[in-house]
Amino acid sequence: MAEVARPLADRVVVKRDEAQTHSPGGIMLVQYQRQQPTRGEVVAVGPGAFTARGVLLPMSLKIGDRVIFGTYAGTTIQINGDDYTIMREGDCSAVIEGEGDEIGTSASAGPRSEVNTWYDK
């Protein structure tokens, strides 16, 4: 029977992206030089956290969200030979939207695109 991790409270289970094997300049990295990925996909979400008054605060993350988190965030576990990280929702810094390689950009994003207009409001 396959094992499943069901996170409790405000925790999420994230499958980290694979570590890069080459630097941006094309140099092949040896195992100890590879940085642990700080991006991944949410594969399980807890119900949320309770306040002191007993009110459930729902999670803002959902299964399938691509997130950015700290290098040493959470606890790494192994299930069925795959590595996953369990962390609090607050350990996730941002949700990646779109398919571009750069965060917050898209194919048509220019210097004054809708992505960068938050400071104009």
Image: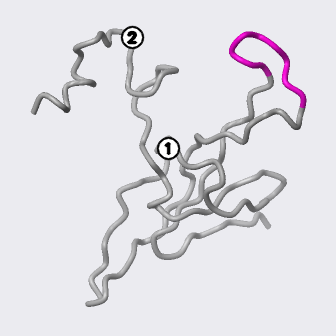
Q: How many marks?
A: 2
Q: Residue at x 12, y 28 (%)?
A: 120
Q: Is residue 70 left or right of residue 99?
A: right
Q: Looking at the picture, how far across and down is residue 102, in whole percent?
A: 48, 22
Quick check: 42 above or below 113? below
Residue found at the far left of this picture: 121
Q: Is residue 36 left or right of residue 43?
A: right
Q: How is the image coloured?
A: one colour
Q: Which residue does the numbered mark 2 point to in the structure image?
A: 107
Nearer to us in this view, 89 or 8: 89
- Disc 1, SS: strand
Quick check: 44 above or below 112? below
Q: Residue at x 45, y 48 (%)?
A: 93
Q: Looking at the picture, how far across and down is residue 25, in whole percent?
A: 72, 10
Q: Which residue does the numbered mark 1 point to in the structure image?
A: 67
Count residues near mark 2 (Cα–Cα under 10 Å), then give few for <14, some for 14-19, many for 20+. Answer: few
In magenta segment, residue 24: yes
Count residues near mark 1 (Cα–Cα under 10 Å), then give few for <14, some for 14-19, many for 20+. Answer: many
Q: Residue at x 56, y 44 (%)?
A: 41
Magenta segment's dominant SS is: loop
In magenta segment, residue 28: yes
Tell me the number on the disc at residue 85: none
Nearer to us in this view, 15 or 101: 101
The amino acid at mark 1 is Val
The amino acid at mark 2 is Ala
**Highlighted range, magenta:** 22-30
Mark 2 or 1, nearer chain start: 1
Q: Looking at the picture, how far across and down is residue 50, in whole percent?
A: 35, 81
Task: State if disc 1 and disc 2 touch (CB < 8 Å).
Answer: no
Q: Residue at x 32, y 13 (%)?
A: 109
* Structural distance between the alpha carbons of marks 2 and 1: 20 Å
